[in-house]
Image (spheres, rainbow, N blue to C red):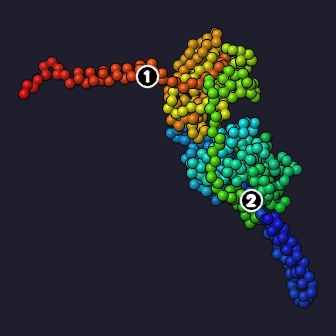
Amino acid sequence: MRRHVRRAMAAFGVLAAVVLTLTAGSAAPRAGPVHARAIPPARTVVTFTWGGGLADQMGALPVFRRYRMPATFYVPSGLVCQPGTSPGCQRSPYLTLGEVRRIAAAGHEIGGLSVQHVPIIGVPAAEAQRGICDDRLNLTRWGFRVTDFAYPFAQVTPTLEGLARRCGYNSALGTGQLRGAGLCPHCAWAETIPPRDPYLLRAPIEVASVGTTWSPATFEKIVTGAQQHGGGWIIFTIHDVCARACALGVTQPELASVLGWLSRQAAHGVSVRTVRQVIGGPVRPAVAGPAPQRIPPPGVANSRLSAVGAGGIPACFQAGRYGTNHATFHYRRHAGPGRAGAEVISLTQRRSGTAQLVPTMDLGTCAPGVTAGRHYTLGAWYESSGPVVFNAYYRTPAGTWTFWATSPPMAASQGWTPGKWTPPAVPSGATAVSFGLALRSDGTLATTRYSLAPVRYTSTRLIAFGALVAAVLIAAVAARRLRRRPGPGTPVSRG
């Protein structure tokens, strides 16, 4: 519609110029020349979007405040650090919930980026839906008005477009579909307003990604190109605010230079807006993703590691490594008790940390669900060159995975041995767990046959527990009477 209006205005301007020229030719000789009014430049809108939910993005706020410009911050809610429920927020690379609220209070838009900001192409549709819908649900529960989404890693399919719509978003952003930074020379210069497909907003390649080098001049060239070819919408996607040049980011001086230049372009029809300001539309009710299905006994999907996924890692499992060490993972077919399959972990050059194979820390497809407050017994068979421990993790209601507990060491074993451990009760609010065996020294560990079983209190255990409680009560009463008995030399009243 707006495009037709602009064309009509342009046609009217040309017609007016012709009429005025003809009128000037027939006027008295003393009349001065008549000039048609210049047609205003086409409207160009620039939007800055920030992805990843990284804490260093707070460095952009004072720059946007200086130039009184807004931006859109796409936030993966499962990575947002919440003091009190997520320990170590001061060391987290991600935004805290308080910082996200400060961003919104400064006039910026908060959008969705999936719960965990992981690739959602190729995962089951229910898991992808949980990632998209539950992110918006979390952000809505925290008090944000969430209407726009960005595809993690700009990976888009028709299925994901449909899920973004179903989860209540008004738009969804991709990158790399417009020309810029020397790439995609045959692509369009800008996205249209309104966009031709709101669930695939087109944008230049992400800032400083795929080997591109960006400077303030790069931003200016992209905007100028759009101005010179009819205007439209330019969306810049940035991840970091860095102290010096870095991948996927800009420095504060670079950002200030770009915003300063844009502020001087206002007279030429350039404005800076958020995605919501351009897209518009209602704030739809938040929609929860599908509930996870219960995993039947032994309580862990692909527990015998018989199915193999991408990269040779067993399906529904992931390789985990942390600390300073070198770890390799190798899948062995027809290994372990029952010869279904096993994973061999080799740990070398260890200075700290460890490596382990754990059920995938997802939102419901693979991670074993649990009930908060209950006790569960974790199990896995293993062969190892040294002592091993269980490391356990749990998922919060927001979809955040956090460390839970470590078991006492279990002895090394040259043959297949069942390892079992019952950690403390599942923490309040936890919805799922993940766990694995790990070495704490250089060596090898083979593992398979994972299990998770709730602790069931039998009548024998209940009787034993009751007897223990009774014994404690009797001892407490006896101790109280003993304290009341007069000691030697204590006068006794005979009144």
> At which x and y percent is residue 92?
59, 38
Residue at the farthest top position: 414
The mark closer to the camera, 1 or 2, is 1
| Secondary-structure class at tag 1 | helix
| Secondary-structure class at tag 2 | strand
Closest to the observer, 348 or 140: 140
Does residue 216 appear in the picture of this structure? Answer: no
Label 1 is placed on what type of residue?
Leu
Q: Which residue is mark 2?
A: 45
Q: Which residue is mark 1?
A: 462
**Residue at 50% over, 39% down:** 84
Q: Is residue 493 left or right of residue 388?
A: left
**Residue at 76% over, 64% down:** 269
Closest to the observer, 387 or 297: 297
Residue at the farthest left position: 495
How far apart, in angstroms, are the residues tagged by discs 1 and 2? 70 Å
